[in-house]
Image (cartoon, rainbow, N blue to C red):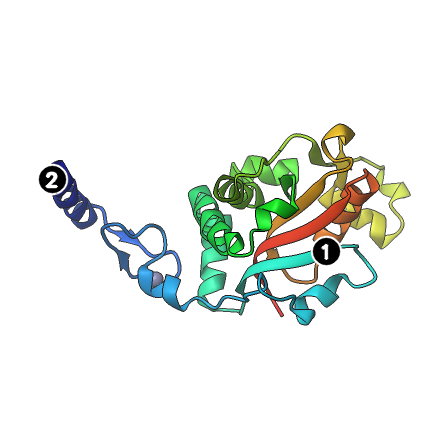
Amino acid sequence: MKTRFKNYLDILLDFVYPRICLSCEKNVLGAEKHICIECIMSIPKTNSHFQQIELIERKFWGKLNVKHVYSFLKFSKKGKVQNILHALKYKNKPELGEYIGKMYANDLKEIDFAKNIDLILGIPLHTDKFKLRGYNQADEFAKGLSAGLNVPFDTTSFVRTTFTISQTKTKSRFFRFKNIEGVFEVIDKSQIKGKRIALVDDVLTTGSTIEEAGNALLGAGCMELYIITIAAAY
Ligand SMILES: [Zn+2]
């Protein structure tokens, strides 16, 4: 009886406060959360958990010693995946990241992935961006993966710092870039050393940010490195 009452209440709430699918913008109803069932069934998956995809892996060849890159969805401009990533980043929807993380964890369970890693880390966000957005979308995704896979995740031992160099000293383009984006820094090596780590981000495009972060972890003694992203462009 209680369940039936709750169902009526949900229907009423959907009527009073319509919720929209963050992928296709149609109304989501009843038990649907964030993304409608039609979109969930049709969003393009990479299936990179079953086999390595060369077009994804090659982004890191000769640059980062990574065991396997897992990307959940295939990114295409103006597609449904772009809408999802946009909502996660710019529409104040941190819970969407966690939701997708749990969804992808179900796929990764099919290959018993949890046995390969000791720790999950989101790519740290620059402090200014964190203050502006109020959350780090990579950490939200990592949180969902962590809950679904039952592997710990940490947001304190790996950070992005800004170091200030006076403008006259920032002659090279490289240093100017670093100055804006900050640098990755391991502040607690004991959390990283000897660990098998999954480094997590929202989207993989050129891979340069992940490369920089991954090398900082390997430099601090990370034993094996995996990459997990919500989507990859390839
Ligand atoms: Zn939809």
Image position, residue 99 (x, y; %): 43, 47
Residue ID at (38%, 61%): 40
Q: Secondary structure at mark 2?
A: helix
Viewer-proximal residue, 219 or 207?
219
Badge 1 density bin: few <14, some 14–19, many ≥20, Cα 10 Å: few
Q: Secondary structure at mark 1?
A: loop
- Quarter of the image for the N terminus: give it: top left
Q: Is residue 24 visible?
A: no
The reply to whether the C-beta atoms of the residues labelled 1 and 2 are less than 8 Å apart is no
In the image, taking residue 191 as reference, residue 132 lies left or right, namely left
- Quarter of the image for the C terminus: give it: bottom right
Does the beta carbon of the residue at mark 2 sit less than 8 Å from ligand 1?
no
Amino acid carrying mark 1 in the image: Lys
Residue labelled with disc 2: 5
- CA gap, disc 1 and disc 2: 50 Å
In the image, taking residue 42 as reference, residue 174 lies left or right, namely right
Q: Is residue 134 visible?
A: yes
When the figure is inspected, residue 173 is found, relative to residue 46, above or below; the finding is above
Image position, residue 158 (x, y; %): 70, 35
Image position, residue 91 (x, y; %): 44, 48
Between marks 1 and 2 in the image, the one whose residue lies nearer the viewer: 1
Image position, residue 140 (x, y; %): 52, 42
Amino acid carrying mark 2 in the image: Phe
Viewer-proximal residue, 176 or 215?
215
Residue labelled with disc 1: 67
Viewer-proximal residue, 26 or 41?
41
Residue ID at (81%, 38%): 220
Badge 2 density bin: few <14, some 14–19, many ≥20, Cα 10 Å: few
- Mark number for residue 33? none
